Amino acid sequence: TASGSFALVAGLLLGAGIGNKAVFAIERPDLIAAWWAGGPLVLGQSIVGGLLGGLIGIEAAKALTRQPASTGDLMVTPIVLGLMLGRVGCFLAGLNDDTHGLPTTLPWGLDLGDGLPRHPSALYEIAFLALLGGLLHRHRARWAAVPGLRFKLFLAAYLLWRLTGDTLKPVRVEYPGGLSGIQWVCALALLAYAPLLARAWRQRPASVPA
């Protein structure tokens, strides 16, 4: 129904907005503390927070409106394309975007504005998303029998990418293990999400190739 669809969109947008800022606050508690002490408010964004918040928001809306159908598979390709476009912007922003990579001596290191060759982390992510999106699109028929499986595969893969790939980025505020706040969010989200992914994977028909 129209009211049910509106509830899903509202849940998605509200959840994504809250998650976006909440995970940024986890990633940069130093900026939040500076604002609390009277400094300027710096509001950044977190892709991971937006994805997780949007997921929680839409699942909450589905529960409230009693809509059990999975809606995530249709969003996989638009999300992948949107993330790739966003990372183009991150790359063009250079050091100003605060998502640049660590200095490197590898031959493909790029000077992003400070005279140091750095890992082009945004380009790494674009390449990863292109590969992931291509695989999920090419083999979409394999997982069509299990609604939501393709989205679960996408989200788990992206969280794992950020958990590992962010080791090539500066850690602004170090958490236990030398990880950033976003890496810890990814690790915990993967632990919580893994049983759901495993359950969906086991529901594949026996005739569907692994």
Image: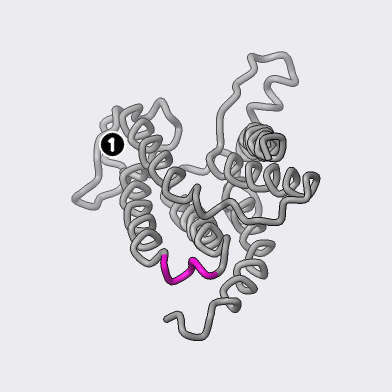
Find out whether residue 180 is within the magenta segment. Answer: no
* In the image, farthest residue toward the front: 1
Main structural element of the magenta stretch: helix, strand or loop? Answer: helix
Residue range (magenta) = 141-145
Is 32 positioned to the left or the right of 120 in the image?
right
Residue 181 horizontal/vertical position (percent): 62, 46
Residue 144 magenta-drawn? yes
Q: How many numbered marks appear?
A: 1
Report the residue at 80% width, 45% height from top: 64
Q: Is residue 86 left or right of residue 70?
A: left
Q: Where residue 88 sits in the image (x, y, percent)?
A: 33, 35
**Residue underneath mark 1:** 116
Kind of element beneath mark 1: loop
Q: Does the image show residue 22? A: no
Say which residue appears at 67% left-offset and 15% top-offset: 39
**Residue 99 placed where, x, y %?**
43, 37
* Direction from residue 115 to residue 33 in the image, left or right: right
Of residues 25 and 175, the one drawn nearer to the viewer in this rendering:
25
Quadrant that contains the C terminus = bottom left
Instruction: Mark 1: give few (<14), some (14-19) or many (20+) Cα within 10 Å.
Output: some
User: In the image, residue 156 lies at what x, y percent?
Assistant: 54, 60
Left/right of residue 169 with respect to residue 58 in the rendered view: left
